[in-house]
Image: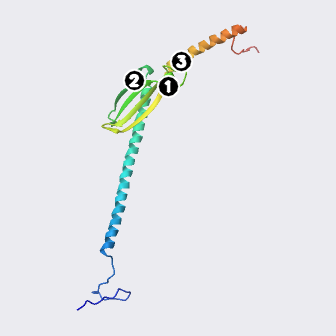
Amino acid sequence: MFPQRRKPCSSEPRRALEPCPSGFTLLEVMIAVALIAIALVTLIGAQARSVAIATGSQFDAMASMLAQWKLTELSLQDFGQLTGSSGDFGEVYPQFAWKSEVEEVSESDSGIKGSSGMLKAIEVTVQVEGDSARSYTARTVVFNPQQGKADAGRARTEADKARADADLEAGMGGNSGPEINTAR
């Protein structure tokens, strides 16, 4: 009438048809599945973040190389011909575009006396075409060697004149340089 109580499984041999009451309950199985699901979601999220970081690093490396390439190309141009422009990198890197801006660096910006007209700042921005969110900007300052030579020569001439005038006033006969004795 009433079902018999089964004995708990033990180390004793049992009959093949007699079930063992031990095992996992449905609640225990559901908790285990939930924990595994949480762990897998976390791992998949970490994997997605690492792929995004790797893609960003790949862009940064490629864009910095292309920006340096373009900065070098622009800084080798004639100083007077430097102007802002834009373009792409041709068939080699068709997905990247560049834009350059050139501006004169004034004496007050540089803090260098007499540098007016001698310095220009070049800024190159590289970005993936159609995606303005991913961009890389590099900046450099170039020096006008012709202007620098002219200014240095003019400064030297003015300094020589001033030194000669000072020597005349002091009665040194105008020779302000060091005396060189070539007699042996």
The residue singled out by tag 1 in the image is: 109
Residue type, mark 3 in image:
Lys
The residue singled out by tag 2 in the image is: 83
Q: Position of residue 23 (x, y in %)?
A: 33, 78
Q: Earlier in the sequence, mark 3 or mark 1?
A: 1
Q: Are marks 2 and 3 in contact (CB under 8 Å)?
A: no
- Relative vertical location of residue 183 with respect to residue 35 in this rendering, above or below: above
Which labelled disc corresponds to residue 122? none
Tell me the mark number nearer the camera, choosing from 2 and 3: 2
Residue type, mark 2 in image:
Thr
Q: Position of residue 153 (x, y in %)?
A: 56, 15
Residue at mark 3 to residue at mark 1: CA–CA distance: 21 Å
Q: Badge 1: how crowded within 10 Å, few (<14), some, or many (20+)? A: few
Residue type, mark 1 in image:
Asp
Q: Position of residue 158 (x, y in %)?
A: 60, 12
Q: Badge 3: how crowded within 10 Å, few (<14), some, or many (20+)? A: few
- Relative vertical location of residue 51 with respect to residue 148 in this rendering, above or below: below
Tell me the mark number nearer the camera, choosing from 1 and 2: 1
Extreme-bottom residue of the structure: 1
Query: Which image quarter holds the N terminus?
Result: bottom left
Q: Is residue 47 visible?
A: yes
Q: Looking at the rendering, which quadrant does residue 27 occupy?
A: bottom left
Q: Position of residue 44 (x, y in %)?
A: 35, 57
Q: Residue at x 66, y 10 (%)?
A: 164
Q: Residue at x 46, y 30 (%)?
A: 140
Determine whether the residue tagged by mark 1 lies in a helix, strand or loop.
helix
Q: Are marks 3 and 1 in contact (CB under 8 Å)?
A: no
Residue at mark 1 to residue at mark 2: CA–CA distance: 19 Å
The residue singled out by tag 3 in the image is: 149
